[in-house]
Image: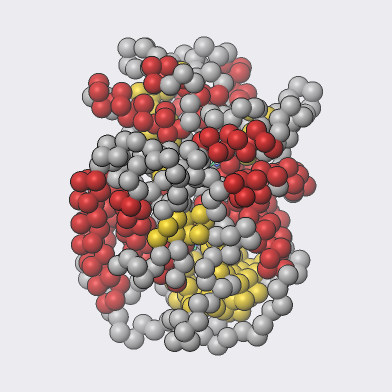
Amino acid sequence: MLKYDALIIGSGLAGLTLALKLADQKKIAIITKKSMLDGASAWAQGGIAAVLSPEDSWAEHIQDTHIAGAGLCDPATTRFVVENGKAAIDWLIQQGVPFSRDEDNNYHLTREGGHSHRRIIHAADATGLAVQQSIAAKVIAHPNITLLEQHIAIDLITGNKLGLNEQRCYGAYALNTVNGEIITISAHNTILATGGAGKVYLYTTNPDTATGDGIAMGWRAGCRVANMEFIQFHPTCLYHPHAKSFLISEAVRGEGGMLKLPDGTRFMTRHDERGELAPRDVVARAIDFEMKTHGLDCVYLDISHQSKEFLQQHFPNIYARCLELGIDITREPIPVVPAAHYTCGGLMADLDGRTDVAHLYAIGETAYTGLHGANRLASNSLLECLVFAEAAAQDILAQQNSSFKELPEWDESQVTDADEAVVISHNWAELRRFMWDYVGIVRTTKRLQRAQHRIQLLHEEINEYYTHFHVSSDLLELRNLVLSADLIVQSALSRHESRGLHFSKDYPETLAHAVPSILTPGNYRS
Ligand SMILES: Cc1cc2nc3c(=O)[nH]c(=O)nc-3n(C[C@H](O)[C@H](O)[C@H](O)COP(=O)(O)OP(=O)(O)OC[C@H]3O[C@@H](n4cnc5c(N)ncnc54)[C@H](O)[C@@H]3O)c2cc1C
């Protein structure tokens, strides 16, 4: 049994930031499914929102967040995150992140949809990679941090599971995906920093790691989840047979990119007076509408009116990737489709990142803090990772460590090798296809019920598989994806209105009073 003061599950921005903030005083383990930079954080292009300019104000950032969130953002959380924004960016600058500068050598701030000011600090168009590389180097160098790559957490070890009738977390079991060994990790505090659940959908901008593992593990451990129906679909994912999940950043629209039909007609102004800078849900629904109306596979994003120098300077990554695929963005429009991008809901966490289970924290995209409401304002999510990593660190550092509990080893005596791996691959494909078709951008009660019925069948099949066979990463991820899908559908069915990212043809109106949809384990069959 391995013993640590803190076990951090996930090496995205939330997990790595927390590790660095604890490591001078605590012994830390980070486990991560693949390699250190494989989460969504390293894929973030646009940047991080914070009030950094004298023309901007906290009040305006808060107001923009509330408007995007369609009345459902938690006011205390929003204020907390916005007010801690500058300190979070200052910390990154201290870590050596090479943010882009303007001609006067000030940090360049860009503007994205829904923001009333230029307030997005960025490192060209590969902000996440620059941030992650800077802090990963410090994590690797820190003697108090043990990094276990190629380890997937299976489940949390809780007092209830140990028969102690205690809502408390003691650590987790994890599978070493290289040698198949299952390790037991005992920790004073366990932190879920596992990212979102975008892989529940057929088309997503998310990396393969985004299978809702933390949300599912937390739910099984007894945590409530909130607002799982609010899945943000990014309007502009590159549509190309050889491009997997490549995002065309919102900043392209921020710098004048126009959405067009194949015949060159600009259409956003017909849907919203803010045109291409309308919030993402409005843009995604407009594209969905145009694609369905005209029977299109994609629409086009045209930034070719900007000079080649401008495009190469502002979007070097997008420019190069498109060119590799034969699309010269300086001369022609970019084919794009909407794709699942961000999980606004998650495990309920307070302003210290604490969940309903003692000594279990949830930070980053895995958590529901109330910041995003019914729709995330662009570039608020990396900020949320930073602010809640700091808050959780302070909360953990204020605790006295107790003694370590002896934990039972993982029991494999009742299982055998799997005989029919096809069950897993088939169910993965089926789940992601029907979630796309039935639980996508525009929903109906009937389609949600169809999805629910299929989820029930998948649950039964996968649980039987899980009980009888050795675990594999595919099986663990599928189990978590099905549970995440179930929570999304249950939340969607419980919302009898359209608000933000949740649009139902059966309930097109927005109710006067906004309430989060909260699911409690035990009240539901999952
Ligand atoms: C293409 C793209 C562009 C984006 N651009 C922006 C942007 O410009 N600005 C912005 O604010 N936000 C952006 N976002 C959103 C933002 O990147 C994410 O919300 C944020 O990075 C989430 O960070 P995280 O630390 O919570 O999770 P992640 O960075 O996703 O990290 C999750 C980690 O958990 C690990 N993990 C998961 N399950 C397990 C398990 N069972 N066991 C062990 N490890 C596990 C993963 O391997 C991974 O290391 C973008 C997202 C995408 C996909």
Q: Is residue 340 left or right of residue 254?
A: left
Q: Position of residue 234 (x, y in %)?
A: 43, 36
Above/below status of 274 relative to 34: above
Rendered residue at 37%/12% (across/down): 264
Give the farthest residue toward the front.
512
Rendered residue at 32%/46% (across/down): 496
- The answer to whether one can see residue 140 in this image is no
Q: Is residue 156 left or right of residue 89?
A: left
Rendered residue at 53%/50% (across/down): 370
Quadrant that contains the N terminus: bottom right
Q: Position of residue 262 (x, y in %)?
A: 32, 16
The image quadrant of residue 220 is bottom left
Q: Is residue 479 left or right of residue 168?
A: left
Q: Position of residue 498 (x, y in %)?
A: 36, 39
The image quadrant of residue 116 is top right
Looking at the picture, tell me which residue is in the foreground, 280 or 423. Answer: 280
- The answer to whether one can see residue 32 in this image is yes
Above/below status of 235 relative to 418: above
Looking at the picture, tell me which residue is in the foreground, 364 or 173. Answer: 364
Above/below status of 324 relative to 77: above
Above/below status of 397 relative to 313: below
Q: Position of residue 281 (x, y in %)?
A: 42, 34
